[in-house]
Amino acid sequence: MAKINPLLFAIFIIILIPNISLSCPQHQKEALLQFKILALRYLSSHIDFFKPFDTWNNNFHADCCQWSGVACSFITASKQVVTGLNLNSFISGSISEYATCSLDSHSQNIVLSSHVLTPLFHVRTLEFFFISCNNIQGEISGIGLSNLTALVELDMSHNMFNGSIPPQLFSLRHLKSLSLDFNFFHGEIPVEIGNLTNLQELSLSNNKLAGAIPPALCRLKKLQVLHLQYNLFSMAIPAVIGNLSDISTMLLNDNHLAGEIPLTMQKMGQLMQLNLENNLLSGEIPAWMFHFRNLGELKLGGSQFVWKNTSIVPKSMLSVLSLRSCGASGLLPLWLSNQTSLSYLDLSVNNLVGNLPSWLTKLKLTHLILSDNKFSGSLPPILFQSKLKNIDLSRNNFSGNLPDNIPYTISLEILKLSSNDFSGPIPISISEALFLRFLDLSKNRFSGNKFPSFEKLLFVDLSSNKLSGGIPLTFSPLVVTLVLSHNQFSGVLPQYLKDLYKLQCLDLHDNNITGNIPAFLFQISSLRILNLRNNSLEGSIPNNLSNATLLQILDLSNNKLSGKVPSSLGNLSAVIHNSDGSFFNFFSPKCDVNYRLPDPLFKLLHQSWTSKQFDSFYDSWLCTSLIISVEYPNLEVIWKTSKRDLPQHHLDMYTLLDLSMNQLSGEIPHTLGGLKSLKVLNMSYNKISGKIPATLGDVDSLESLDLSHNNLSGEIPNTFGKLLQLAVLELNNNKLTGHIPNGPQMDTLNDPNFYANNSGLCGMQIKVPCDPEAPPKAKPAEKSESKEAWFSWEMAAIGFPSGFLSTVISLYVIGYFSVAPRRPGRRHV
Ligand SMILES: *[C@@H]1O[C@H](CO)[C@@H](O)[C@H](O)[C@H]1NC(C)=O
Ligand SMILES: *[C@@H]1O[C@H](CO)[C@@H](O)[C@H](O)[C@H]1NC(C)=O
Ligand SMILES: *[C@@H]1O[C@H](CO)[C@@H](O)[C@H](O)[C@H]1NC(C)=O
Ligand SMILES: *[C@@H]1O[C@H](CO)[C@@H](O)[C@H](O)[C@H]1NC(C)=O
Ligand SMILES: *[C@@H]1O[C@H](CO)[C@@H](O)[C@H](O)[C@H]1NC(C)=O
Ligand SMILES: *[C@@H]1O[C@H](CO)[C@@H](O)[C@H](O)[C@H]1NC(C)=O
Ligand SMILES: *[C@@H]1O[C@H](CO)[C@@H](O)[C@H](O)[C@H]1NC(C)=O
Ligand SMILES: *[C@@H]1O[C@H](CO)[C@@H](O)[C@H](O)[C@H]1NC(C)=O
Ligand SMILES: *[C@@H]1O[C@H](CO)[C@@H](O)[C@H](O)[C@H]1NC(C)=O
Ligand SMILES: *[C@@H]1O[C@H](CO)[C@@H](O)[C@H](O)[C@H]1NC(C)=O
Ligand SMILES: *[C@@H]1O[C@H](CO)[C@@H](O)[C@H](O)[C@H]1NC(C)=O
Ligand SMILES: *[C@@H]1O[C@H](CO)[C@@H](O)[C@H](O)[C@H]1NC(C)=O
């Protein structure tokens, strides 16, 4: 962001304000006022909330050097010109030196066109130009930029600029600092970049830049900081990069770079920060990588590097070390105990073994990430008294109780111990971790019916343990995800759940919850996922779902629900329209990774802020805390025919309505036909009667429909021929009759089990010809069509159901199959 020290910038402004009234040049003032007018045009509808240009008054005597965000310098004893503009975050109401990019709910919706900048290109004396965090969209005018020949520092980061980087930029040869991070620039970095020989900082991260890293970069002899992370750069890192002998920070992570680390990088003697994570780089991590004397931050995880010799001792004091997924084995290297400055350690996804040594807690660690290894033994109690904020020991072989006789540290924010062998109660003293926000204790053997206070938590996963008693009553009204599934919880759904106004996911499946489904559950308007499968709930399904506008996964199967299927289910708007995609908003460009307020402030502000301020702050807080913890608990549902863990950060792709295995009666409401985005509908094993409504053929997205084991009668509606995504159609064990409809996809659904045990179905799908004398439902033309189909049914049988295929492909794309189906088999008895 702002490259010059903001304090210096402020002093710079103050010193340069003249005592004598020397105004800035008239034409520069006019240019600035022109800019103000253009910008206000975009802000006008929001101008009640903030007044960024308050000091930019246009009376004749006004001196623009005194306006906020404007800096001037004397070029002669009596003449000054505008040399600096700090317009960071002006759309969020103030022009501040500390750009946070945490746009509030008003400014998030404002988008400015890059034309607003046109007048500013007339201020040719500009040396500093900062305009980050303003939602400016469109291409940057290269001709305009080429006017600003005096520029030394340019910061246009955190906007929505697109197109390629304008070549004229490379004629600004005084540039020392250039930042275009967090935009949508694409194309390659032009070789002309080598012309900016004064450049000390080059930041192009978080764009869509591609191609190779140009070897011309090595001409930037003064370069100290290079940020190219989160782009699409590919091919090998050019060997000449080693000629950047002054470089201290090099972040190339999250690209598609391949090949080995060039040997020449040994020459980068000033290197302090190196991040090559998440590329396609390979080869053994060379010994010299640990020989840089000033190296403080080393991140090489998530590529295909091999860290063979773990006993090479670094020659520097590291503060950050990440060697995730580098094939390391053996014990934790002992030299780590001498790394007394280490605060961030990520050695996850390796084959490390042994106990967690207690010397770890003597380091200054704030992040300890050792998930997916083979560590074992119990945890040293002192671990919870250290300065650690983030502990992730998931998927190891740790065992024993969590210590309860010690005060838990106040600094702990994230604790993930999933998939180990821990047992005993959840320690009551965990409540002392006042800033704990994320607790994942799933897939262990925790037991007991007494719980600590969970008042501070936003993400709770206690699933797959042996917890019992009533559902704990101490969750925060701000909790977002509450997963208590697969335990032995009992009792009714507590009333206070209706106060959880941020709740997006409530998962209580596989417990023994009793009583009715209270109507208030559906008044939690933030709710997207409600999973109550396999409990002992009875009574009817509440009929008023008008407030459940975001609900997209509703699983009430395997309970004792009775009564009718409410017709209001057809009003679930998230299932009608495609989801708005704002689920958790994890990777929104507005989630600024660098934005972070210290937590004690969080508490203070919470008390004094208005709810609007709080909500906007809360969202950015959520962004940061979520980005830290890349993995979220998965959601377990029956997707089509088998149990699946759906990855939470892609959940907006899924819509599901499962009411199976209850005692529901009455007819299928025809309103369900309105659920255009519904992909899975399961009402099997109920007592539903009447006809299948023809409207179901309107559910275009439907991939799996299971109505088996009911009392349905009449014919299968012809409208089913329109369903092109359908891959599973279970209609067996009903009283259906007549002709199974034809259609491009229907013709492929020829598994006889789909239709077994009915009262007289016919059709080419089950090789039962329909009686030609039967009531002529179909016109003669249609009949001949079905005859043709009858002839070619064998062809159809070997064809793939296209809907199924498209889903499989998209699931591959999102990495769905990294989680194998846990219990395949179509009947869940
Ligand atoms: C460059 O600056 C001059 C003088 O202020 C101005 O007249 C001209 O229009 C500017 N060119 C562009 C492309 O903005
Ligand atoms: C840049 O964004 C604008 C506005 O969204 C769009 O009209 C234009 O086509 C985009 N240009 C490029 C090169 O993508
Ligand atoms: C880069 O420098 C070369 C020679 O120094 C010059 O010919 C060329 O025009 C420059 N390119 C740009 C875009 O300034
Ligand atoms: C890189 O530096 C070496 C000497 O350190 C020099 O011989 C070589 O020419 C330089 N390469 C480039 C492309 O500047
Ligand atoms: C690992 O590195 C250490 C220190 O450089 C060296 O003494 C040892 O021989 C190396 N071990 C292997 C197996 O290469
Ligand atoms: C830690 O540092 C001390 C002093 O520098 C040294 O004697 C000792 O061998 C080191 N221990 C390890 C495990 O590297
Ligand atoms: C896990 O640890 C237990 C002892 O606590 C041991 O018996 C078992 O073999 C370990 N399992 C694995 C997979 O390492
Ligand atoms: C229902 O949940 C219980 C645990 O509460 C579990 O033992 C059982 O297997 C589950 N039944 C089904 C069909 O999943
Ligand atoms: C569920 O709870 C009810 C009432 O508390 C009890 O009768 C029933 O046996 C329990 N079912 C299971 C599977 O534990
Ligand atoms: C439904 O939601 C609205 C606002 O989203 C709220 O004002 C109203 O009280 C809710 N209705 C009920 C019955 O809770
Ligand atoms: C459903 O609840 C809303 C408030 O959430 C209320 O305004 C509406 O009248 C209710 N509708 C029915 C049919 O009960
Ligand atoms: C569903 O929505 C329609 C139109 O928005 C409305 O008329 C109807 O009352 C709603 N039905 C229920 C049961 O809420």
Image: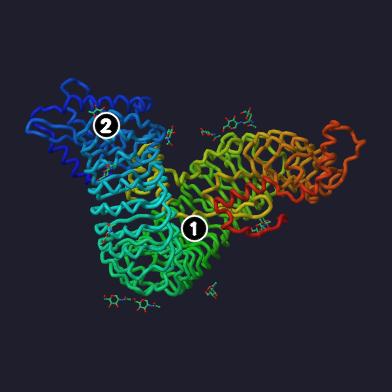
Q: Which residue is mark 1?
A: 440
Mark toward the start of the polypeptide (1 vs 2): 2
The quarter in which the N terminus is drawn is: top left
In the visual, does 272 lie left or right of 756? left
Answer above or below: position of 521 versus 490: above
Answer above or below: position of 691 versus 323: above
The quarter in which the C terminus is drawn is: bottom right
Amino acid at pointer 1: Asp
Q: Nearer the viewer, mark 1 or mark 2?
A: 2
Q: Quadrant of ligand 8?
A: bottom right
Q: Which residue is depicted at the point 32% across and 69% down?
A: 288
Q: Nearer the viewer, residue 660 or 163?
A: 163
| Extreme-left residue of the structure | 77
Amino acid at pointer 2: Phe
Q: x%, y% of residue 606?
A: 36, 43
Q: x%, y% of residue 359?
A: 35, 72
Query: What secondary structure is found at the residue carrying circle 1?
Result: strand
Q: Which residue is mark 2?
A: 121
